Image: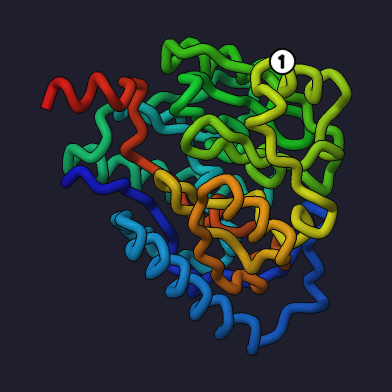
Amino acid sequence: MDGRPFFLMTDPDGFDVSYRINPWMDPASWTPAQAAAARAASRDLRAAITAIGGHVETVGAVRGLPDLVFPANAAVVLDGRVLLARFRHPERQGEEAVFRAAFQRLKTRGVVEELVDLPDGLFHEGAGDAIWDADRRHFWCGYGPRSSQGAIRVVRETFGQETVALELASERFYHLDTCFCPLAGGKVLYYPPAFTPAALATIHEHVPAAQRIEATDEEAAAFCVNAVNIDARIVMARAPESLRRKLAARGYTLTEVDLAPFILSGGAAYCMTLRLDRTSIPAAARHAAE
């Protein structure tokens, strides 16, 4: 890796909405025109990430695995270690072998260092439910609809980092990344109704009110919380004006991409990417060592 943020994406040629495993998915609404729009949207997302300084590599499409376009669910990656996912729904379990092979190729190239398997009996759907907070230096871990609460211990032990558990309250916001996004500088964009009262109390305990940015119903339904953040720059699905104003007031620059075809499957910018270069070493320490 050359120092740029390194992201994995998936070729969208195999993408469609052909089954329903979350409330957003409606196979009857899928058309060939949306398939063409999905290819364009994926290109635009890649271009947006590249424009703000990221590097993107692509996993090939596999027919019959439409949600392969959401590699954030494939693994948790930190310090070169890869904790491979285990999917709860049979419709996505075929992705596991595809991503394992992709990570093995990345390991051969030295992009990652080690692959770790989840213990039997647990489900965990990758960085969608284990989001690294570089400022607080811990994982925010969602559980409930998809990932097992018991898998949080595995995340903690695999990476040797603190974990903060957040129970999700809604099948509509079934992964943490659909409703929670740590931003550079310590702020957090999140959608309060997606969490249980206990989880909300945990967020409030760890994030001061001045650093909390609450998404509205409209902003969350537009999948804007599911965003990619590099420093003060954010890439997300098309945003309501209310969110544009909130983020600009906090000093963030926003790039919007029309991701409507993927929102039909319950995913957007963060879901469509997996960052591979995250490190637990604080930025100041990294710069001092260079």
Q: Residue at x 56, y 85 (%)?
A: 36
Q: Residue at x 38, y 52 (%)?
A: 8
Please tell me in which quadrant of the rendered image residue 237 appears.
bottom right
Q: Position of residue 121 (x, y in %)?
A: 65, 21
Q: Which residue is mark 1?
A: 205
Q: Does residue 100 show up?
A: yes
Left or right, 268 with reference to 281:
right
The quarter in which the C terminus is drawn is top left
The quarter in which the N terminus is drawn is top left
Q: Position of residue 37 (x, y in %)?
A: 58, 82
Can you say whether 82 is above or below 48 in the image?
above
**Residue type at tag 1:** Glu
Can you say whether 248 is above or below 281 in the image?
below
Q: Nearer the viewer, residue 119 or 15?
A: 15
Q: Position of residue 100 (x, y in %)?
A: 40, 41
How is the structure coloured here? Answer: rainbow
Left or right, 159 with reference to 129:
left
Name the residue furthest front: 249
Please tell me in which quadrant of the rendered image residue 196 appears.
top right
Q: Does residue 71 show up?
A: no
Q: Residue at x 67, y 52 (%)?
A: 246
Q: Residue at x 46, y 13 (%)?
A: 161
Q: Please tell me how many numbered marks the rendered image carries.
A: 1
Q: Nearer the viewer, residue 31 or 133?
A: 133
Q: Position of residue 216 (x, y in %)?
A: 81, 51
Q: Secondary structure at mark 1?
A: helix
Name the residue furthest bottom: 33
Left or right, 208 with reference to 75:
right
Estimate how packed mark 1 is, as few (under 14), some (14 to 19) or many (20 or more) residues with alpha carbons within 10 Å: few
Can you say whether 115 is above or below 50 in the image?
above
